[in-house]
Image: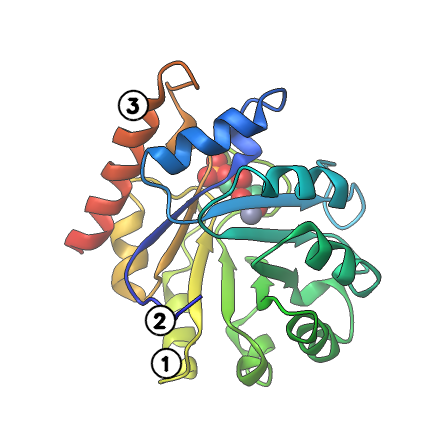
Amino acid sequence: MPFDRSIKIAPSILSADFADFGREIRAIEDQGADWVHVDVMDGHFVPNLTFGPPAVKAFRRHVTTVMDVHLMIAPVDPYIDAYADAGADILTAHVEAGPHSHRTLQAIRAAGMKAGIALNPGTPAEAVAHLLDLADLVCVMTVNPGFGGQKFIDMTAKVRTLREMIGDREVHIEIDGGVDPGTAPMLAKAGADALVAGSAVFKGGSVDKPDVYGRNIKAIREAAEAA
Ligand code: DX5
Ligand code: ZN
């Protein structure tokens, strides 16, 4: 996966039809998704439960782009090999998930994946200052993780700080939560390059009306690129 600084749209399949993941993944990819964002929740780190390694491995068979797996679980380390085996390209853990994020990022890379570190809205940019040499992606949460469709929390100042801290390192800044054509421009301008969007991509569409996904993806991308 060569480093790509351009805007990438990563639809979150948390907003897809849970009984039809294969066709949903193929539909968003056909309609221009750059990455497929997979939200793993454990009902403990966050108050919601989604899917685990066997489901993620089944998704993999349908993903031809990049499978971007966002772990909202604690602990993380016992599951890293299972997500490598499931075929994650990027594996992101929360900095709040435990005391040893440094070790976690090393283990993710050692397992052959790109390593991401996510920050909740209440966590300052400085929490990842000593992790940037071990990270391929920093995910800035713009909602409190756990659910799709929540109200956007403005974290543009944090994004700007992180962009400065990252300097010329090859580290993506991903935004997750409440991204739509209205919020995308300020995020892109602040230095984000990967935009996760659940409701704003799936809204109004379905596997039988996939062109709606395409229009939604295009609207977010164009808004971000125009910033
Ligand atoms: C939230 C998840 C997000 C979520 C985004 O906990 O990590 O990826 O699906 O959904 P929207 O775009 O609807 O805020
Ligand atoms: Zn997510």
**Residue type at the position of mark 1:** Glu
User: What residue type is disc 3 on?
Assistant: Asp
Query: Would you place residue 83 above or below residue 170 in this image?
Result: above
Q: Residue at x 35, y 85 (%)?
A: 168
- Give residue 149's position: percent from left, percent from top: 50, 32
Q: Nearer the viewer, mark 3 or mark 1?
A: 3
Q: Which residue extends farthest right?
A: 78
Picture disc at residue 164: 1
Looking at the image, is 110 positioned above or below residue 80?
below
Of label 3 and label 2, which has the lower sequence position? 2
How crowded pointer 1 is (Cα within 10 Å; few <14, some 14-19, many 20+) is rated as: few
Residues at marks 3 and 1, CA–CA distance in whole angstroms: 38 Å
Name the residue carrying label 3.
Answer: 211
Element type at marker 2? Answer: helix
- Disc 2 target residue: 160
**On the image, which quarter does residue 218 sit in?**
top left
From this view, report whether residue 199 is shown above or below residue 171.
above
Front in this rendered view, residue 30 or 196: 30
Is 105 or 188 nearer to us in this picture?
105
